[in-house]
Image (tube, grey):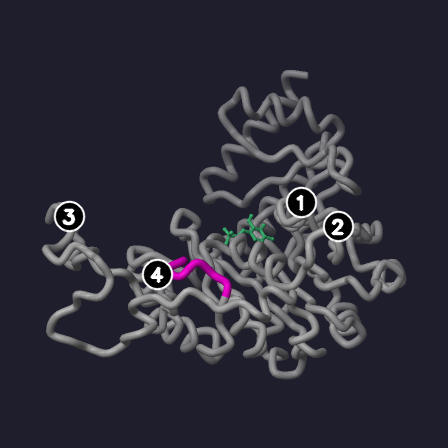
Amino acid sequence: MDINKLQRENIKNLRPYSTARDEYKGQAKVFLDANENSYGSPLTSGTGIDKNYNRYPDPLQLDLKDAISKIKGVPIENTFLGNGSDEAIDLLFRAFCEPGQDNVIILPPTYGMYEVSASINNVELRKVNLLPNFQLDLDGIAEAIDEHTKLIFICSPNNPTGNSIVRTDIETVLTNFNGLVVIDEAYINYSRQRTFIKELMEYPNLVILQTFSKAWGLAALRLGMAFAARPVIDILNKIKPPYNINQATQDIALDALKNIDQVNEWIKTTVEEREKLSNALQTLSIVKKVNSSDANFLLIEVENALDTYNFLVEEGIIIRDRSKVTLCEGCLRITIGTTEENITLLDTLRRSLNIQ
Ligand SMILES: Cc1ncc(COP(=O)(O)O)c(C=O)c1O
């Protein structure tokens, strides 16, 4: 794969914005180069923040990337950080897809932002549905690819179905496709399958997305990661807004990364709760099928999805109605809650059966 050919012509020719912090990186006595407020920031001591936020943050977030690198084992130069994985998804479109000319392939049912980003960027979307077992239709994908196909999005574990995609099938796509294969691993921490991170050096066309929004419990922070070969990361860094990760996000993420033991404990509990909830749901008469899940949610098929959904809303329990989604007819998606929340859900569903 030739990254120079893959990227858009205007991106290849782009001279990126050069920030004050790009032009002078060292320590100094006096900084008068970025038109910041030299007096400080008006934070009250009540916030517990001991830092002045009057200075622009590190545009490349090197301290944070260093801490992430120690956990993930990916070098800093192969790591991009975005304002959520959603920013990385959007930047991939902007860097590689010529509006009105190129196309991307998605594999429904899958995460909705790939389609939204394609529409925003005026890029043709080709849909190759998953097979009824929610695995890849490799022949369909091969047929959909043409010389203008730039990206293929594979979500594994997949949202909303919850299953992991068979590893050898993903490898087949990686080997045979000349554009970028984006593996969205937002839910990888809950999976029985291992991440593709170790394969990064093997495939120059592999992009892995991960996020702090799920297992790391920091959805409000908006911090996502993309791991890829150096030329891809360099392009994303070239086109990103200069200070896309704010200082508060960098500080809070650095603090959270010290607490990985807590995260691992929650992952273990979530997986145990997933199996308990799955077994319990299968005993309910309205439940036709509980799909096996490698994520922190379950996709279940029920007798009357909308009635069940509405009943739960009235009882103050909000789940996701997925019954209108391709291949998910009659299905509801339920996030794994705390032990108490899962018991409340099950008790409420049992009560609904008694009412009927
Ligand atoms: C598969 C998948 N990718 C990405 C995201 C979004 O991640 P972020 O919060 O980092 O933008 C989600 C959120 O639901 C998701 O399900």
Q: What residue type is labelled 4?
A: Ala
Marked residue nearer the N-terminal end (1 or 3): 3
> Could you tell me how far apart the alpha carbons at marks 4 and 1 are, in whole angstroms?
31 Å
Which residue is tagged 3?
Answer: 43
> Could you tell me how far apart the alpha carbons at marks 1 and 3 are, in whole angstroms?
40 Å
**Which is closer to the viewer, label 4 or label 2?**
2
Which residue is tagged 2?
Answer: 125
Marked residue nearer the N-terminal end (4 or 1): 1
Figure quadrant of the N terminus:
bottom right
Marked residue nearer the N-terminal end (1 or 2): 1
Question: Residue 283, how many percent across, how many down?
Answer: 69, 38
Region of the chain picked out in magenta, as a range: 239-244
Q: What residue type is labelled 1?
A: Ser
Marked residue nearer the N-terminal end (2 or 3): 3
Residue at horizontal 55 percent and vertical 24 percent from the top: 313
Question: Residue 47, how many percent across, how many down?
Answer: 17, 47
Callout 1 touching callout 2 (CB < 8 Å): yes
Disc number placed over residue 96 in the picture, else none: none
**Which is closer to the viewer, label 4 or label 1?**
1
- Report helix, strand or loop for mark 3: loop
Q: Which amino acid does label 2 sit on?
A: Leu
Question: Is ligand 1 within 8 Å of the beta carbon of the residue shown at mark 4?
Answer: no
Residue at horizontal 12 percent and vertical 70 percent from the top: 30
Disc number placed over residue 119 in the picture, else none: 1
Query: Against 31, is 100 above or below?
Result: above
Which residue is tagged 4?
Answer: 253
Residue at horizontal 74 percent and vertical 33 percent from the top: 324
**Which is closer to the viewer, label 4 or label 3?**
3
